[in-house]
Image: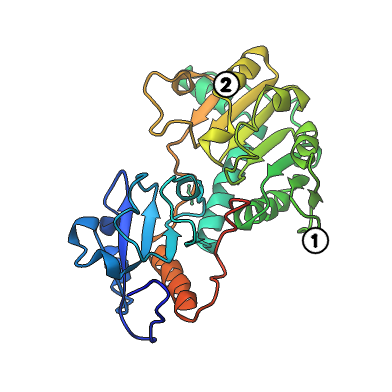
Amino acid sequence: MTGAAPKAPGEVIEGVYLCSSFDLSDFYGAALEAYPDIRVYRPEEVPDPARIRFALVWRPAPDAFDAYPNIELVQANAAGVDGVLGNPGLPRNVTVTRVHDEEQAAIMAGFAAWHVVWHHRQMGHYIDAQRRSAWDRQTIKTLRPPSQVTVGLLGYGLMGRAIARTVASMGFPVLAASRTGGDAAKGVTRISGDDAVQRVAARSDILINIMPLTPVTRDILNAALFDRMPRGAALIQLGRGKHLVDDDLLTALDSGQIGGASLDVFQQEPLPPDHPFWRHPRILVTPHEASVTSAAAVSRELARSLRAMRAGQRPEQAVDRTTGY
Ligand code: GLV
C-alpha cells in the first residue's frame, strides 16, 4: 500500500503514538474509543508498519518515524509544534497538524490574567508579608489603575487573542505584536511589522509572551529587548523555554530593569533542581502547566485532521512548515 491510497469513509485508518518521554496511549486511548474508524497503536504493538498512515505525537525521538514509510499526517497533541518540526527524522512531505482548542485558549487566558494581577498588585509582597504577620500596605499610595498599565502581548493567534480580550476586559490597555495588521478586540491595539516585538516591548509595563518557537523567535527575550522595556517591567513567559536567554533575565532582574517574572516554560524541562530560577525571590515558576488540552479535544482534533486527509483536503489546523506555525 502506498501513502496516497485513498480510504473510503468508515474504513479503519491506522496510526501510531510517538513520544520520547511517556506513553501517550495512557492519555488518549480511552477518548479515542469514541472514534471507531481510528486505531492508534503503541509502537511495540503495531501489526504492520506499512499500514501506519498517521502519528499522534509529543516530542518524538529523532528516529521515531523511521519505521513507518507511509505516514501522511503527523498530529501534535499540543498547540505548539516546535518539537515536531525540529525533528530531523520528520518525513519531508507529511502534513503536520496542531491542536486548535478554544478551551485551551480560555484556560491560558485565565492564567495570564492571574499573572497580570500578580505583578500589577505585587502579590509576592503580600505573601511574604503574611509569612511575617506584617500589615504592610505596599501600594496604597502608589498603585496605578489598570488604565495606566500597558500589557504587551507577543503572539496573536488563538491563545494570544483570548489573553488580549480577557486582559483588555480588566481595563488594561493591550498592545499586541502581530505579523499582520487588521482588526483587534476592544481595548487591544495591534502592532505589526518586522519590529513589532521590539515596539510592543518598549511600551509594556507587563509583557506576555505566547509566541510559537521558530528560528525567528528563538532567544527573542534577551538583554536587548529587556533594555528597551520600561524600568521595572514584568515578564510573563508562556511560550517556549527557548525564547528566553536565562542569564539575560537574571541580569535584568538583578539590575532592577525587570521587576519580576512568571515563567511556565524552560530551556530544559523539567527545570533542573539547581537552576537559579527556582530560588529567585522575584520569579514565580510553574511547571509548563499554564494550559492544557483535554484528551477529548486532542482526539477530536485528530479525527478532524484525518477527516480532511481522507477527503483529500488540507486540514484547517495544518501548520505552514516554513513559518513554523
Ligand atoms: C503546550 O505547550 C502546547 O503547545 O499546547
Q: Which of marks 1 and 2 is in front?
A: 1
Q: Give x and y (percent) for residue 248.
A: 61, 20
Q: Name the residue under label 2.
A: 135
Q: Disc 1 and disc 2: Cα gap in Å?
A: 45 Å
Task: Depth check: give the residue in front, 181 or 187.
Answer: 181
Disc 1 residue lies near ligand 1 with CB under 8 A: no
Label 1 environment density (alpha carbons within 10 Å; few <14, some 14–19, many ≥20): few
Residue 163: image location, x then y, percent = 64, 51
Q: Residue furthest front?
A: 2
Residue type at tag 1: Asp
Name the residue tied to disc 1.
Answer: 183
Identify the image quadrant of the C terminus.
bottom right
Is there any visible trace of residue 207 in the rendered image?
Answer: yes
Write down the quadrant of residue 213 in the picture.
Answer: top right
* Res 40 visible: no
Looking at the image, which is closer to me, 34 or 87? Answer: 87
Secondary structure beneath dot 2 equals: loop
Q: If the image is split into quadrants, where does the N terminus sit? A: bottom left
Name the amino acid, label 2: Trp
Q: Which residue is drawn at 50% across and 49% down?
A: 85
Of mark 1 and mark 2, the one earlier in the sequence is 2
Kind of element beneath mark 1 = loop
Residue 55, percent across and down? Answer: 36, 61
Where residue 35 appears, as percent x and y from the top left, is 33, 76
Q: How crowded is mark 2: few (under 14 residues within 10 Å), some or many (20 or more)?
A: few
